[in-house]
Image (cartoon, rainbow, N blue to C red):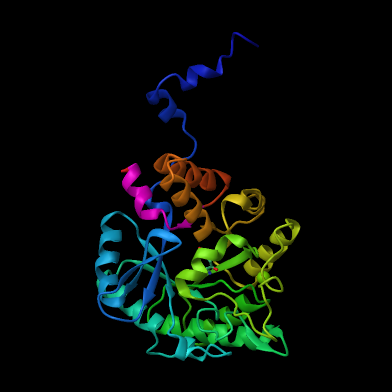
Amino acid sequence: MFPLRRNRRLRSNEAIRSLVRETIISPNDFIVPLFIVEGKSVKEEIASMPGYYRYSLDLIEKEVKELWGLGLKSVLLFVKVPENLKDNAGTEAINPEGLMQRAVKTVKNAVPEMLVMTDVALDPYSSFGHDGVIADGKILNDDTTAILAEMSLSHAKVGADFVAPSDMMDGRIFEIRSLLEDEGFHDTGIMSYSAKYASAFYGPFRDALDSAPVDAQEVPKDKKTYQMDPSNRDEAIRETMMDIDEGADIVMVKPGLCYLDIVRDIKNVVNVPVSVYQVSGEYAMIKAASEKGWLDHDAVVLEQLTAIKRAGADMIASYFAKEAVKLIS
Ligand SMILES: NCC(=O)CCC(=O)O
Ligand SMILES: [Mg+2]
């Protein structure tokens, strides 16, 4: 064919490149994770996530107004629970006056149009740092899903638009959907972490919320009996299809960069929106390497986000959301 077809013609300047560009990231693509703590005027930087903070509720108001001003219209809330409120069953998770419940109200109050998603999992509330109730050294699936359903209902009652179960217990989407329907919360959506891998890239997040599994006898030392084995791909399809059957409105692959093959596999076979969580370790790697001057921070951030979207993400939960929208505006 050469020289009839010269591919470089379509790359010869920015005008033609922008005309033929296939993937464009915009503020509409992002879900912004927010870490919330008790207290007044608290803005604590997370040591392993430079530039990312835990906020107390009084400061969250200003933060979500700023996000809205940048065109960021969805947040995903996580809370750091005081140690004395943690127990095996994560009882504090369903406290109607708990930090998460107050956080939802605070965000809705500050910016009523903001889409509020809530993390649904026991680990921030568990005295053992696990996503499930433990007995005899095992994570009890069905006891846990019953609590997750109650937790979801409690978030729906205070105004959460979507609940986002991140635990990977079997059958929790069905349990949550059923209880929400029974209680009249027909419009509360579910974004399911449907293919969540047992990844080493969650380390900084566990520092942020102090939610790592504790080192003790009778406590599983990792989350490999519920989160997926990074070696598996067919299993991701199976997990995702089941969650859709059980009532998930949005499915998720997590982490992002190492799992973009999974994102594409899933995008090819589902007909619901697919979200991708670019996790704390992915954030930390870019921050650390660019602090050393080894990577061009802004370029790498945009390249990774674009790659996630190109792989098939309809939306991205990312700690870079705010920086990215400033870079592309
Ligand atoms: N449910 C949230 C996580 O488990 C971790 C996210 C992260 O590492 O950013
Ligand atoms: Mg599952």
Q: Residue, x 67% and y 50% (percent of image)? A: 265
Name the image quarter holding the N terminus. Answer: top right
- Magenta-colored span: 314-328
Q: Residue, x 58% and y 46% (percent of image)? A: 311
Residue at the far front: name it: 292
Using the image as rendered, state which of residue 163 and residue 282 is in the foreground.
282
**In the image: residue 143, left or right of residue 274:** right
Total marks in image: 0
In the picture, residue 17 is in which quadrant?
Answer: top left
Residue 315 visible in the current orientation = no
Q: Where is residue 319 in the image (x, y as percent from the top left)?
A: 43, 58
Above or below: residue 114 compared with residue 37: above
Q: Quadrant of ligand 2?
A: bottom right
Q: Residue, x 46% and y 29% (percent of image)? A: 20
Q: Position of residue 235 (x, y in %)?
A: 74, 61
Above or below: residue 233 compared with residue 117: above
Residue 291 visible in the current orientation = yes
**In the image: residue 51, left or right of residue 185:** left
In magenta stretch: residue 90: no
Using the image as rendered, state which of residue 77 and residue 73 is in the foreground.
77
**In the image: residue 321, left or right of residue 10:** left
Q: Position of residue 329 (x, y in %)?
A: 30, 43
Q: Where is residue 131 in the image (x, y as percent from the top left)?
A: 60, 78
Using the image as rendered, state which of residue 191 and residue 216 is in the foreground.
216
